[in-house]
Each structure stands twice: as structure tokens, then as C-alpha cells.
Image (cartoon, rainbow, N blue to C red):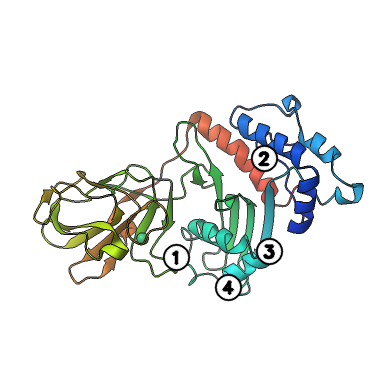
Amino acid sequence: MTSPKYPQLSAASPPRRLKALLIVGAVAGLAMLFIFLSAGKGSQPKELPASPEAAEAAAPSAEDAPEVEPNSPLRRLHVVLNGPLESAIISASDSQVGPALTQVLVRALVWWVDIPRHLMRGDELWVVYEVRENADPLVYAVRFASKRTGKTHEAFWFHAKEERYARFYLPEGTELELRLVDGPLEDWEQITSLLNDGRGHQGVDYKVPSGTPVKSPFDGMVVRKNWNFRSNGYSLEILETGGRRRCLFLHLEELPSSMRPGQAVKKGQVVAHSGNSGRSFAPHLHYQLMDESNRVLNPLKEHKTFQRQLKGDNLAAFETEREHLQKLLEGAP
Ligand SMILES: [Zn+2]
């Protein structure tokens, strides 16, 4: 059984894949383009002008056939951890893809364990992913058997209808990422850094387009703006009414002059817009909370949190994709 959305999994090593891709590039390109264009429309395989079968028929030799599905952009890896995560990922993929793939995977794993503190020898990781030009690898599915939690965790990449962004969902159709009650953003593409991801990071990084409205998480007063400009860029610090906590927003778009120290703000008020200023390599919002003694607080613990759940048609579509991806994780061709 094949799904129109996910071509069959390739088990080929990268060099053989590349060679095969060159030879059948045109056919595969057409097939992939069509799959891309028809994604989400529930097209039938028989309607494909350049079907996976056609691409396979154009493959260079029969002896490659069991290993090479040259039309497939998908790759699978399985590793048992016996050292650093990135080394394991590189040895199971390659040195070009491995580091970026590790970063993307950590964005999922960090919701289950602290990285790298809770990674343990013998932990197992299965991944279905796609390598992309000029973009991070796309992880379609990840399964993580953790010695620390004693559980096998899974997440699947899915683009729900009427949602702006694709994101990771747990097997039952719940979003992987936690959302903050009274948080600074209505929506975002992905959380790219948390306090427990091993980077010594002091806030939560939200990947969002520049110009996204940023709201104050509490009633308070502006105490600083644009300090340490070279690294923080346009930035804003708000002291909570009562004086217990402060929130910091970094890498903003230029702030209006009305937003100055002493300015009172209300919870939920738009106080800034996200940007890409200072030491920032892609548009994102850095959101940080601190207490009166300058200790960094975890926004996921300070805020109430919730997870959204897919419903109706979205849930049904997700379940179909999840089942397909689960078979790919298990190594089904
Ligand atoms: Zn940050």
C-alpha cells in the first residue's frame, strides 16, 4: 500500500542515491513536483503522470532496485546511542546533513528529555526525514525509545488545514509543543530553542516572521529598551506590577518612541513586533523571564500551558499519514 503524499522510503546510501538521482532526475523531478502540487488533494496514484513505478522503471539497473528508490526524497535512519547524539546522527546519515538534522531532531526530543543530560547509552532513535536544498532537513517522523523515561515517544510532522504552519504532533493528534496561556505570541512556526536543550540558552526562541505582534505577559512597566544593542538588537524589558518578575524581548523590529522606560503596559497589550535585529541569524523572538534576583525562569513553568488537539477532518487526515509514517519508521519499503 502506498500513499500519494509520501513516496516510498529509500534505504540507499547517499552516493548511490545521488548517482541514481542524476540518471532519473527528470522523471523523479516531475514525480516529486506532481506529488508536491497534489499534496493535500488526496490524489490517486493512478492519476500521476510520472508515477513512482515509472521512475522505478527508469532506474539504471535491476541490481540497484532493492535498495534504490531514486524518486524518493525520504531517508530513514535508526541509531542506538553510545556517545554524543550528533556523532550518532552523522554516522547514520553523513557529515553534511548530520549536524543540521541533529538540531532539528533536538527540537522534538527536548519535549521529552533534557538534552544532552538525559540522553543515555542504549537510547534508540528512528527518523524519517528529507534533505532539502537551502533549508534545514525536514523531519517527517521521529521515534525515541528513552531509558530515562522508560517510554517510546513519537512525533509526526503534519500540516493541518487552515493552519499557517506545519508542526509536530503526538500520535493522538495533540501538538507536541506547549502553548503559553497569556504568552507573547498568538502563533509561531516552531520553537527553536528551550532552556533545557543544552545550549545554555536563557529564553525560549520562537521562529516567527518579522513584524509579528508581541504582547506583554503581565501588567507592568517598561524598564529598559535597546540595551547591549549589538547582541540584543532592538529589545524591551518589562517589570511586572508588584515587582517580582521581568520579561525580556530581544531581536525586535525598531520600537516606537512611545515605548520608553516608565511606560505602563497591560497584560496582552501589543508592546513590540518581532524582528531579526542584533545577533540573530533568522527572524525570531527571544522571550526570557527573570526574577528579582536575576535568576532565569522557565516560561513553560511560569505560565499555564496547553496543547491544541486536531479534530474532525484534520484528525482523520493526520491518522492516515501517521500510520504511513509509522510503517516507514519501522523500515517498510
Ligand atoms: Zn534566544
Q: Residue at x 44, y 40 (%)?
A: 309
Q: Residue at x 47, y 49 (%)?
A: 176
Does residue 80 appear anywhere in the picture? no
Dividing the image into 4 quarters, which one contains the N terminus?
Answer: top right
Q: Residue at x 66, y 35 (%)?
A: 33
Return the disc, 3 or 1, that comes first in the chain's sequence. Answer: 3
Residue ID for mark 1: 197
Residue ID for mark 2: 6
Work out whether residue 2 or residue 63 is closer to the camera in this orientation and state it: 63
Return the disc, 4 or 3, that comes first in the chain's sequence. Answer: 4
- Tell me how far mark 2 sits from mark 3, CA to CA: 21 Å
Amino acid type at mark 2 = Tyr
Identify the image quadrant of residue 302.
bottom left
Task: Give the secondary structure at mark 3.
Answer: helix
Task: Give the secondary structure at mark 1.
Answer: loop
- Tell me how far mark 1 sits from mark 4, CA to CA: 14 Å
Return the disc, 2 or 3, that comes first in the chain's sequence. Answer: 2
- Tell me how far mark 4 sits from mark 2, CA to CA: 30 Å
In the picture, the disc for residue 55 is none
Decide: is 183 above or below 29: below
Residue ID for mark 4: 84
Residue occupying the far top of the picture: 47
Return the disc, 1 or 4, that comes first in the chain's sequence. Answer: 4
